[in-house]
Image (cartoon, coloured by chain):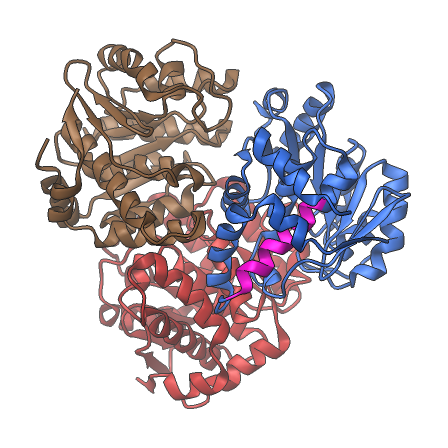
Chain colours: A red, B blue, C brown
């Protein structure tokens, strides 16, 4: 895929309004990541308004990182609201295998037909019903071990499935891509995976799901590579990462994307 | 207004305890902004204790960015608690025009007599009953379009009303000021508007509302101008902004404030 | 105590999974602090899953900074879940003296037998039943004034008690240590005390409570000293602090720890 930059251009030109229902850890950094990239984030989650707002937003993302019964009502209402107006939504099944509560929630959200699912290998394996060893938000499984599960999950759910890690794997169940962009400091900063889900949402708004998801991953990973230059640890890395998301151009992305068909 | 620095001096000398009921995105940055400026923030929101704490705090701020029924109980109790001890409170009507839930909440909070209201143009227009085009937390209307609405809202509510944007407008319904401090990177960092509401609260504690609000806006905007020097994007800007809030002196503010009567 | 570095080595080698039930202000920075230090944080708090997850995590921390009835259910369930599998938990009694709601909550959590309690002087005095003047999250009492209270609280509760401030005091009721590491910019950044509680949790996992708590305090304070070199205010300090937590070695800690028996 050689035209990742075109997807970034569309994002910057349309500045999509991204409704984010996300966890308490990620809220601030996810909003800053979306602003830096050129999108317009809105954190609107309560059941009193989440469905109505899904009728306004261009795209919805749902992250189950800190779930509770009240929030689940808001998630379900929002996903139904997005479906009612034909807008896509992106699922981030954080630590879905860790507790019975999360396994049930993951299954419930999956039934609401996300357009894209983004998770680490353990999360995708758990959601695909293949068991998994992840205990917290960190993955205990390599990406390669989740490729078959991702293809099955994509085929059964109708979603594009992105397994992220050192080399990402993205599939719609038929076609697949790998993206090698990224840096080892990224998992040392909390909520970057959650924030990536927001970026995927911003890219898929009005663009083809599979390619837009791949472009989002390349953009995010390339910003990580840039940020790592001169960073002295996870603190300075995070600062430079926001600067890089803001500064990267479509031409930079076309040059720096390391994507290939799988 | 040439003595903005005196208001900053009072804030630094008294280090007011600012009770903040704010949204999940803003909590951390708002607390850091208040600490950097010299105030003492306390995030106390639940209905079990928000009224009691409002009797201890010097000033209260209420931001409706991520509302839910339980939090609304806490907001109302706190505003009533502040009124009971004669302490001012500041309203931040985030995205008040976006959903029916927020329109109702805005009207309910307005009836509880805030001393100051700070919002963007779309929010002030919506609260003034003039309709508005804002869909998320970002304004779709220019500040100038909200000046009449702000004057009417101030007159009808008894609050000082601050419309913030590239050039801020502040009025008590009779007198008015404009403040031109600020920088284009500020709206690229999430929750800075929310944090400004906290700063307004810290300035109005024990000081005349209209002038203190203007001084707060000049202080915040001037810190933004300083932070932008040498910033490479929204990440490094945010870091430098906290440093600037901490380092700005009263003399700096007197020299750098760009305020005039409107 | 001359072997603080050995405790850090164990943390890095074992990368303990630290379940954090903490306040909304601290969530992001606490997770980043734990990641930078080498631990694996997991923010899991709701009553639907907090007990089950406490059976998976290596250690649990409970911070009562933004309490609500629903969260208290999750805290109690998690503490009971940790007890059921013999895992230690650490209590952070934020502003426990400020409201009746917090006083009741502090007493209830204390009865659930924390392995370690970390607070500022006002909080420890309030928990020890000695009254206190703290009104927000900041301490109004010097550490030295809380030493007797800390010894009594340790003896009556069975917990190791750490009073943190310019010079920290740690006791199990019989033995005691003082730690002089730290920097004046630390209280200018919000939630660093909360984050320190997470670090204490990571250190005590599988290690002797008293010594591991002292080593955690020395590590955290030494990172603060390093971060202050070249910082221009609380913004750049916080960035450098995460870098320092990540970069500090066991040998650095052995050299830089300023700990003595009290």
Image position, residue C145 (x, y; %): 34, 14
Identify the image quadrant of the C terminus of chain C: top left
Magenta includes C77?
A: no
What is the magenta range? Answer: B215-229
Image position, residue C172 (x, y; %): 19, 18
Q: Is residue C123 left or right of residue C222?
A: right
Q: Residue at x 83, y 56 (%)?
A: B146
A195 and C141: which one is in front?
A: C141
Magenta includes B221?
A: yes
Image position, residue C129 (x, y; %): 38, 9
Position of residue B133 relative to residue C258, above or below, is below
Image position, residue B149 (x, y; %): 87, 51
Number of numbered discs overlaid on the protein picture: 0
* Dominant secondary structure (helix, strand or loop) of the stretch shown in magenta: helix
Q: Is residue C177 left or right of residue C19?
A: left
Q: Residue at x 55, y 42 (%)?
A: B37
Q: Residue at x 55, y 64 (%)?
A: B228
Position of residue B74 relative to residue C222, above or below, is above
Residue C56, can we see it? no
Q: Is residue A221 left or right of residue C102?
A: left
B49 and C138: which one is in front?
A: C138
Position of residue B111 relative to residue A254, above or below, is above
Q: Residue at x 24, y 26 (%)?
A: C83
Residue B135, can we see it? yes
Identify the image quadrant of the N terminus of chain C: top left
Q: Residue furthest bottom?
A: A2
B144 and C81: which one is in front?
A: B144
Position of residue A170 relative to residue A122, above or below, is below
């Amino acid at each position: 895929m050689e035209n990742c930059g075109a997807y970034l251009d569309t994002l910057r030109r349309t500045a999509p309004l991204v409704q984010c229902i996300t966890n308490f850890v990620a809220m601030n950094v996810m909003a800053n990541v979306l602003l830096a990239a050129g999108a317009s984030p809105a954190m609107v989650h309560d059941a009193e308004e989440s469905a109505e707002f899904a009728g306004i937003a261009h795209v919805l993302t749902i992250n189950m990182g800190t779930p509770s019964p009240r929030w689940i009502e808001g998630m379900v209402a929002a996903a139904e609201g997005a479906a009612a107006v034909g807008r896509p939504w992106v699922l981030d099944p954080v630590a879905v295998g860790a507790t019975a509560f999360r396994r049930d929630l993951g299954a419930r959200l999956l039934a609401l037909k996300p357009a894209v699912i983004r998770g680490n290998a353990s999360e995708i394996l758990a959601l695909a019903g293949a068991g998994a060893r992840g205990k917290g938000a960190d993955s205990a499984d390599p990406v390669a071990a989740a490729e078959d599960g991702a293809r099955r999950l994509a085929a059964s759910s109708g979603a594009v499935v992105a397994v992220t890690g050192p080399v990402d794997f993205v599939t719609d169940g038929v076609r697949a891509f790998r993206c090698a962009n990224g840096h080892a400091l990224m998992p040392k900063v909390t909520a970057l995976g959650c924030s990536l889900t927001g970026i995927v949402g911003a890219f898929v708004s009005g663009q083809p799901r599979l390619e837009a998801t791949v472009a989002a991953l390349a953009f995010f990973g390339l910003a990580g590579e840039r940020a790592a230059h001169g960073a002295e640890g996870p603190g300075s890395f995070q600062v430079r990462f926001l600067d890089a998301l803001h500064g990267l151009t479509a031409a930079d992305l076309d040059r720096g994307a390391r994507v290939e068909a799988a």
